[in-house]
Image (cartoon, rainbow, N blue to C red):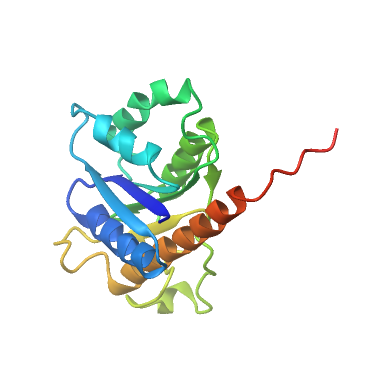
Amino acid sequence: MTKVAIVYHSGYGHTAVLAEQAAQGIREAGAEAEVVRIDSAGQDFGPALDAVADADAILFGSPTYMGDVSAAFKAFEEASSKVFATNGWKDKLAGGFTVSASFAGDKGHTIDSLQTFAAQHGMVWVSLGLPTPAIPAAERGEDTINRVGGFAGLLSQADNASPEITPPQGDRETARLYGKRIAQAAIRWARGAEAPAVPLAA
């Protein structure tokens, strides 16, 4: 069965909500979801690195702190340098998600950071694949899908409140749809890998 790993750090529980919603979408698409939570910058990253190695696609998730990924997620990235040296994750599919308290919060930079991380490993990035809402930003309610208006990955906004109530339903549904999208892409990608390789033109 095609496997999608979700490797994420969540400081206050809001990123964890998105990870679980993405996992639901992955399972609905017929793939296996392995959810791996990063707890601290000082932990043993071996299990998380192994989960990525064993997966066909990976969703990386981090809150946006000071305009970039969290220190704990950055430590995971740096721990992957030994994999980088062997091209161990090359040609795996990847995507990313982030959340911050503000609507902007430089979340786009966090997604750019995750894309660069994936590119350094030779991975193939899967975008969100959802249009921006066809209603004015001021009229977007909490049930609006892709209400923040991301394209490269999932951008979410959560108030400084319990993760039981925020991020709102629209962001949770966006995460579910993104999980489903990357799982469907991984299933197609794995199917294509079984076909004979076509040599590149000289």
Is residue 194 toward the left or the right of residue 76 in the image? right
Residue 67 visible in this rendered orientation of the protein:
no
**Picture quadrant of residue 79:** top left
Q: Is residue 56 above or below residue 89?
A: below
Is residue 68 toward the left or the right of residue 38 in the image? right
Residue situated in front as seen by the camera: 137 or 193:
193
Residue displayed at 33% across by 45% down: 64
Residue displayed at 51% across by 36% down: 116
Residue situated in front as seen by the camera: 74 or 191:
191
Is residue 100 toward the left or the right of residue 123 in the image? left
Q: Is residue 168 above or below residue 45?
A: below
Give the x, y percent position of residue 174: 39, 67
**Picture quadrant of residue 156:** bottom left
Give the x, y percent position of residue 103: 37, 59
Q: Is residue 165 above or below residue 151?
A: below
Residue displayed at 17% across by 61% down: 163
